[in-house]
Image: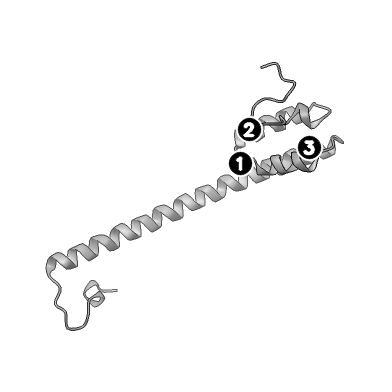
Amino acid sequence: MEIKNLFPENYQPSERAIKTVALLRKVHEEGRTEGRTEGRAKGHAEGRAKGRAETLLLILAARGVEVSADERERILGCTDCDVLDGWIERALSPSSTSQTVPRRGYGPPDDDPQ
């Protein structure tokens, strides 16, 4: 859309007004582009975390490890891929979720001496 068409029909905008509107449109478009980029990145990160959480639950189920509703909620609610990767690594050998996922926070499991 032509910038001059943004003003009322009988209004003769100054060159400064036209430049200001052009700058505002440019800033607005840059903000929209940046927002879209950030939204995509956030969506990809959330998707990766969800995939890891589901992988962890599959590993635990395949090993016959019982997962409580609270533990399932914590696992699915975790959005930190590094934390989930650590839980997945630990899930490959424990016999209970408390050896994989701590009861509180996102640190090492409850029985980890660290």
58, above or below 90, in the image: below
Task: Give the residue drawn at x 59%, y 47%.
Answer: 46
**Three-letter code for the amino acid on which mark 3 is drawn:** Ile
Give the mark nearest the N terminus, 1 or 3.
3
Q: Is residue 80 left or right of residue 65?
A: left
Task: Give the residue drawn at x 60%, y 33%.
Answer: 82
Residue at the outermost bottom position: 10
Q: Are marks 1 and 3 in contact (CB under 8 Å)?
A: no
Q: Which residue is mark 1?
A: 79
53, above or below 8, in the image: above
- Measure the alpha-carbon separation of dots 1 and 2: 8 Å
* Residue 18 place in picture, x, y as percent: 18, 68
Give SS at disc 1.
loop
* Residue 35 place in picture, x, y as percent: 43, 54
Q: Which residue is mark 3?
A: 59
Q: Is residue 106 left or right of residue 21?
A: right
* Residue 69 place in picture, x, y as percent: 78, 43
- Location of residue 62 (image quadrant): top right
Q: Nearer the viewer, residue 114 or 84?
A: 114
Q: Which mark is residue 83?
A: 2
